Amino acid sequence: FSPSVLGTREHWDAAYERELQTFQDIGDTGEIWFGEESMVRIIRWLEKHKVPLDSSVLDIGTGNGVLLVELAKSGYMNLTGIDYSPSAIQLSEKVREKEGMSNIKLKVEDFLAPSAELSGFDICIDKGTFDAISLDPSDAAGKRKLYVGSLGRVLKPEGFFLITSCNWTKEELLNEFREGFEILEELPTPKFCFGGRIGNSVTALVFQRK
């Protein structure tokens, strides 16, 4: 990928500062990455596989925290969201407050250098964070390796990792996460047709930690 401002902390700090101001002004929670259907897809998978409601869930790069709110509404009780942008965590705290979801834990954390207490999760979810890291203008390849290493540390053995990406194909993601993880399932995503060829603009996979 070409390096992009979308891979920089400055970009996301500024973006979430704007969204925080908008939320305070008019109560709009801001953009939901990959849309509502991406959240429904994740929750359906958890329900279909009867993942216990007290499972510990980590939302990596939680942004406005809306996914965690939806998980809480579905009955999940042990929810944590992290983001390296303090503005994103401020916004997600406001959203949590508005929705009355006091059981959601939120922390400013850089997933590439996680604190020791960030460990032992049953489920990790990523909607677009790995994509953003892949666009970092400074050593994206090295940062992707750090990401995979961090994931191995925070996710329990046999824990599940659900990733949604618009930058990576299934085959590419299998290659990125080949060390320590195995593919369980590809989740259905919307199809598009262009020039007579059918494809997916979004890839959604479930991995299990070995």
Image (cartoon, rainbow, N blue to C red):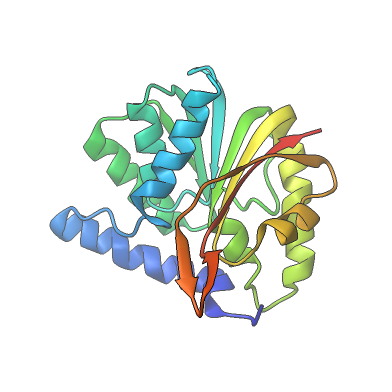
Give the x, y percent position of residue 68.
Answer: 41, 37
Q: Nearer the viewer, residue 168 or 87?
A: 168
Residue 124, quarter of picture: top right
Give the x, y percent position of residue 27.
Answer: 18, 53
Q: Is residue 199 left or right of residue 100?
A: right
Q: How many marks?
A: 0
User: Image quadrant for the N terminus?
Assistant: bottom right
Q: Please report the residue visible at 44 percent of the width from the left and 22 percent of the height from the top.
A: 77
Give the x, y percent position of residue 186.
Answer: 62, 45
Q: Nearer the viewer, residue 113 or 127?
A: 127
Give the x, y percent position of residue 146.
Answer: 77, 56
Q: Nearer the viewer, residue 188 or 45?
A: 188
User: Image quadrant for the C terminus?
Assistant: top right
Q: Is residue 14 above or below residue 159?
A: below
Residue 118, quarter of picture: top right
Q: Is residue 123 above or below residue 165?
A: above
Q: Is residue 102 visible?
A: no
Residue 70, quarter of picture: top left
Q: Residue furthest left?
A: 26
Q: Is residue 154 above or below residue 164?
A: above
Q: Is residue 121 above or below residue 113?
A: above
Q: Please report the residue visible at 39 percent of the width from the left and 25 percent of the height from the top.
A: 103
Q: Is residue 108 left or right of residue 210?
A: left
